[in-house]
């Protein structure tokens, strides 16, 4: 009999995972406590912007292979394998991870688990969580020890979520149970047949792989941003430095793009969660460098604000600034901990009139920063601007014509917070072009 899959929590991860499991051929039921979200999903619409997600979702909703519910009971009756795709935000006012949503879902599901089932955790959690969740589930489930738990961290990138779900770099399973591994081999049969590496390990290692991967990526970005500060002081060029470093295979060129740094719903809170957990385990010194990684990252945002103020003659008061980009990176409408919005907000608070344009994230940005002005196009945002800031690397901004934008601004000054625009082209069109870590 083919396994039936459920996905608890239909955010970024859960929605993509549910649609991906249907794409792999399974009958899938997605569950979320948010009724509006479930209604949107059940109508075949994605509640967030992610390339290729909505068509895949609609195909499987229309075929009946993918359904959504708000009921734990229905999910428990339906599924053999239950994926936990619940958010693990940072606790308010501290670094530690807030597990209340994981606990809430596990406590909602477990009392209905009255036959053998496998629960699969996908979220990024502090090491030690999986073992505690397994105990919690088995204590509350009528099927008790016939319900097992596997930790299977998810590494998907926003903007590539569909691709990463269907073609992951690797599959990691934390478990000590051979039957659980067999079930997971069935779930990922197609992916494994494509040659995707499988790593079976213990709970702790599986939990730590995800936290360590994000910590490494954050460190790489902050490393190049630290070099960017150094380059700026020394009159060197950080982009050429990164190109030269990247040719060393041991280093690699990826994630060495200097700029206003990392943001999003994962990396910033995950490195802080790791710092907090290491402290609880008595090894805070081992990861104290991550505090510096975080500090370098936040400094880049402040640095761009300083550059903007300097470009405008020492004060932002009464100036008009166009901000291109609000999402934390291109190809998403996610503005969680977005460096672009953070900079836009600081400029506004220091007296600039800020006009923001993002191809997808205007609506989500407006909800948390209603005091900024939002434009419907690059040209509209740049109308009468004394300064243009490029803060999210959408292809649309890279393709934009600097001569055309030059016609509508008050002053042809641009700061490229992503070191990605074609500097020669902008300069040729009469712009004063400034990037980070470059002369
Ligand atoms: C990240 C991890 O990549 C993914 O594996 C994990 O599952 C979730 O967290 P995501 O948050 O989608 O994914 O973003 P990612 O593509 O990693 O970018 C993170 C941030 O770093 C973005 O703000 C991006 O603009 C910034 N970044 C990335 C840089 O500033 N420089 C770079 O060279 C690369």
Image (spheres, helix red, strand yellow):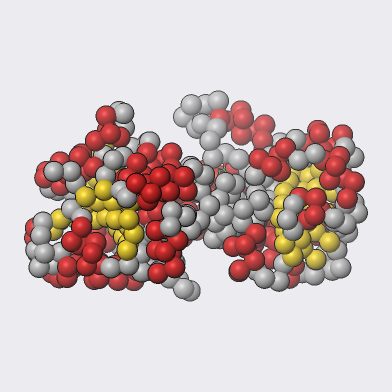
Q: In this view, does 299 lie above or below 197?
A: below
Q: Is residue 350 left or right of residue 2?
A: right
x, y percent for residue 119: 21, 56
Q: From the viewer's side, name the closer residue of 230 and 387.
A: 387
In percent of the image, x 81 and y 34: which residue is there?
Answer: 425
Residue 295 visible (yes or no): no
Which quadrant holds residue 78? bottom left
In percent of the image, x 66 and y 51: which residue is there?
Answer: 359
Which quadrant holds residue 142? bottom left
Q: In which quarter of the image is the C terminus?
A: top right
Q: From the viewer's side, name the closer residue of 255 and 5.
A: 5
x, y percent for residue 294: 53, 57
Which quadrant holds residue 111? bottom left
Q: From the viewer's side, name the closer residue of 333 and 26.
A: 26
Q: In which quarter of the image is the N terminus?
A: top left
In percent of the image, x 43 and y 53: which residue is there?
Answer: 44
Residue 351 visible (yes or no): yes
Query: Which residue in the rendered view is the most extreme toward the bottom?
Result: 93
x, y percent for residue 75: 24, 61
Q: Is residue 329 above or below residue 268?
A: above
């Amino acid at each position: 009999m083919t396994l039936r899959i459920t996905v608890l929590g239909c955010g970024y991860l859960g929605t993509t995972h549910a649609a991906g499991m249907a794409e792999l051929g399974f009958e899938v039921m997605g569950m979320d406590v948010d009724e509006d979200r479930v209604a949107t999903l059940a109508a075949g619409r994605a509640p967030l912007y992610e390339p290729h997600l909505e068509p895949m979702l609609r195909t499987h909703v229309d075929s009946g292979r993918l359904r959504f519910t708000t009921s734990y009971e229905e999910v428990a009756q339906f599924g053999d394998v239950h994926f936990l795709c619940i958010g693990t935000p940072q606790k308010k006012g501290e670094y530690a991870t807030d597990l209340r949503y994981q606990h809430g879902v596990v406590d909602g599901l477990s009392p209905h688990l009255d036959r053998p089932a496998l629960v699969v955790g996908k979220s990024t959690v502090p090491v030690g969580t999986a073992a505690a969740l397994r105990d919690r589930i088995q204590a509350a489930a009528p099927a008790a020890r016939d319900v097992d738990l596997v930790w299977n961290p998810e590494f998907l990138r926003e903007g590539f979520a569909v691709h990463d779900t269907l073609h992951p770099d690797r599959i990691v399973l934390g478990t000590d149970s051979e039957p659980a591994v067999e079930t997971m081999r069935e779930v990922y049969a197609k992916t494994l047949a494509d040659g995707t590496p499988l790593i079976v390990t213990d709970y702790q290692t599986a939990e730590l792989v995800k936290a360590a991967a994000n910590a490494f990526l954050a460190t790489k970005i902050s490393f190049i941003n630290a070099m960017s500060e150094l380059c700026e002081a020394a009159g060197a060029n950080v982009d050429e430095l990164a190109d030269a470093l990247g040719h060393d295979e041991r280093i690699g060129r990826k994630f060495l793009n200097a700029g206003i740094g990392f943001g999003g719903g994962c990396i910033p809170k995950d490195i802080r969660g790791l710092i907090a957990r290491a402290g609880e385990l008595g090894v805070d010194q081992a990861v104290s460098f991550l505090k510096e990684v975080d500090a370098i990252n936040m400094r880049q945002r402040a640095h761009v604000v300083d550059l903007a103020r300097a470009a405008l003659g020492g004060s932002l008061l009464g100036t008009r600034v166009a901000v291109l980009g609000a999402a934390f990176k291109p190809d998403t409408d996610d503005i969680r901990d977005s460096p672009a919005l953070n900079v836009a907000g600081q400029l506004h608070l220091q007296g600039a009139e800020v006009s923001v344009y993002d191809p997808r994230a205007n609506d989500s940005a407006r909800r948390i920063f209603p005091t900024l002005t939002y434009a419907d196009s690059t040209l509209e945002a740049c109308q009468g601007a004394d300064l243009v800031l490029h803060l999210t690397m959408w292809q649309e901004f890279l393709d934009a014509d600097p001569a055309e934008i030059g016609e509508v601004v008050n002053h042809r000054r641009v700061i490229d917070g992503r070191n990605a625009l074609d500097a020669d082209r902008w300069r040729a069109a009469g712009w004063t072009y400034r990037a980070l870590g470059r002369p």
